[in-house]
Amino acid sequence: MLKRESGIKNIKGIGDKAAQKYEKLKIYTVGDLIEHYPRDYDKYERICNISDVQEGKKATIEGTLVRRPVIKNVRNLKIISIKLRDRSGTINVTWFNMPFLLNSLKIGSYYILRGTVRRKMNGLCIEQPEMLSKQSYYDKMDKLFPIYSLTDGISNNSISKSVKYALSEFEDTEDALPAGIRKKYGLLSYKKALEGIHFPENMEVLKQARRRLVFDEFFWFILGIKAMSKNLAKQKLKRVYNENDVCDKFIKTLPYELTDAQIRTWNEIKRDMLSGYVMNRIVQGDVGSGKTIVALLALLFNYSCGYEGALMVPTEVLARQHYEEAVKLFDGLDVRIDLLTGSTSAKEKKIIYEKIAAGKTDIVIGTHALLEDKVSFGCLGLVITDEQHRFGVKQRKNLAMQGEDVHVLVMSATPIPRSLALVLYGDMDMSVIDTMPKGRLPIQNCVVDTSYRQTAYRFIENQVKAGSQAYIICPMVHENDEMELENVIEYTEMLKGQLSPDIRVQSLYGSMKASEKNQVMEAFSRGDIDVIVSTTVIEVGINVPNATVMMVENAERFGLAGLHQLRGRVGRGDKQSYCIFMSANKSKKSMERLKVLNESNDGFFIASEDLRLRGPGELMGVRQSGELGFGLADIYADASVLNEVNEAIKELPDETVRKLVEDNKRFVNCQIAL
């Protein structure tokens, strides 16, 4: 029998080389593998005419090969191209890194192919299709097949086989979720849920399996938060904070007027810091609402009382921008500020470590580098984390624990309806910045279908010629990084052909090295790039006031809150900004969802509408991008489950909570220490 902690090499067919490839997916044990849930499911549709295929959707076509296969090299990819014809027309077909197919591709032969329809430079194309016999096609009709996130050298079929073997040999131990809760809420057993999420017999089984696993994710997360908050509740502050007018004087020097919401939030933070108890507060504010200046006020007040402060952000570019902003705004004050990131040289790091330990710096702004063992604060009084959902709860607490009693402030631009926020952030006091800075022009939005693409390109071109910059987001949902890379690069090359030759276009994608991403984002920030073609890696970590246009391809693939986050990259300067949501799906439901963005720039209203328009039946495809680090759970689609979990935990005695956390640290830590 296999146990959760058994190494991945205990699975039949996985040796040393395969194990190394699985590590790229962060799969080291049997438990990691069985929790590598499908990202989607495939259901084979009926064969359609080539003339009826739709961009962004899967299609099954049949026809005759009418051109000799062509093979070309693009970076490290070998791309095979053919042309297939049926009675209604022809279409190009491409495969990546499958040169062996050349032996089975013959001019005049008949094929059934199934793949995703993409738009390329020379029109629609079917990408990476499966080649099917008539018998295999009809055998697969109306069945659900898991689709996994992959990496180079690991196929969907190999993961499916490994998971099937692991589940057949998996030790069926006692379910960690209390039996009373399982019975009350009608939940499947854990093993049945695992079988149902990977290999569902039908949609109903899939829904029940997913509900159980989502329940688990929320349960262990909230249970861990509850246990942690018991230890932190009203912790007495041993250090002394005294009222002073440093921040009042500083506010008068700002080149802009703070909003009422910013002032209210700052007063709540200051009151916490003066209360005699440790602050544990979250500031929720829409994208561009001015959370950064509130954080800087807290750091300045902390400094004025004689203590060190730390601001941790998710990317190096954002850390540098915050650092430069702080240096500029605090000019004339005797505040010592340092920047600490992964790319800081070893020599510079050593100097900064020594300054931090000796209390010779007042504010340190950085990334995960602040969590390194060598960082030891001499007198840390305040820890702030920006874009808090990018850091695990335990990570934030670990930084705070560098001091004996440290104020904790977390910032979130993720719009979450208050009803859900009270559950997710139940361990924290909450402030909301619900108005935008004065003088900021609202973003003008439009939702269009793919027939408007050329019009959009001309608009982007005119904006760039007028001195602005633009983003184009390609939400590539592919089987591996190589295909993502090829699509972003190919889109970039196609765009260069569509825009004026003097417009500088650059790509940015997830599989780039961190240093390369930073170089591209910094070049864009400096104005050395006019248009950046990116995956959602651009969502957090860059502030370019000169960027006035964002165009999102296949906008229907995102949740509304995720799209609103992306939109927040523009509209940060004094120019009019625009967001173009392009949808390949013209269905009434899809357009109704996107219409919400067309009509509002209010993130909290959009979040509420997302909650209203989406439901448990919408299992995959538009979930938020890793919201709060959950593997399956989506706080919008699964709001009803989240509320059930909250009610279930409220009924548990404190002793039961303590014992559950103690006995199930693996589950708890998985959710709160990502």
Image (cartoon, helix red, strand yellow):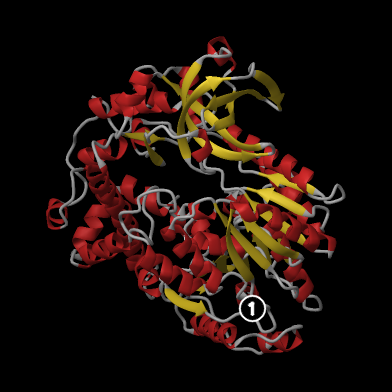
Point 67% across, 63% down: residue = 364
Going by the picture, which residue comes out furthest to the top?
103
From the top left corner, tell me how far across and down residue 382 is, in percent. 56, 70
- Above or below residue 31? Residue 651 is below
**Which residue is tagged 1?**
297
Query: How many numbered circles does the render carry?
Result: 1
Going by the picture, which residue comes out furthest to the right?
502
Q: Amino acid at mark 1?
A: Leu
Q: Is residue 617 visible?
A: yes
480 or 658: nearer the viewer: 480
661 or 218: nearer the viewer: 218
- Above or below residue 652? Residue 286 is below
From the top left corner, tell me how far across and down residue 143 is, in percent. 29, 33
Point 23% across, 53% down: residue = 660
Going by the picture, which residue comes out furthest to the front?
87
Q: Quadrant of residue 587?
A: bottom left
Q: Quadrant of residue 243?
A: bottom right
397 or 618: nearer the viewer: 618
Instruction: Tell me if 25 is positioned left or right of 660 in this view.
Output: right
- Above or below residue 29? Residue 423 is below
> Looking at the rendering, in which quadrant would you find the N terminus?
top left
Instruction: Tell me if 38 is positioned left or right of 115 in this view.
Output: left
Q: Is residue 406 visible?
A: no
Badge 1 crowding class, 10 Å Cα cut-off, few under 14, some 14 to 19, many 20 or more, is some
* Badge 1 element: helix
Instruction: Tell me if 410 is positioned left or right of 2 in this view.
Output: right
From the top left corner, tell me how far across and down residue 598 is, in percent. 55, 69
From the top left corner, tell me how far across and down residue 400 is, in percent. 51, 63
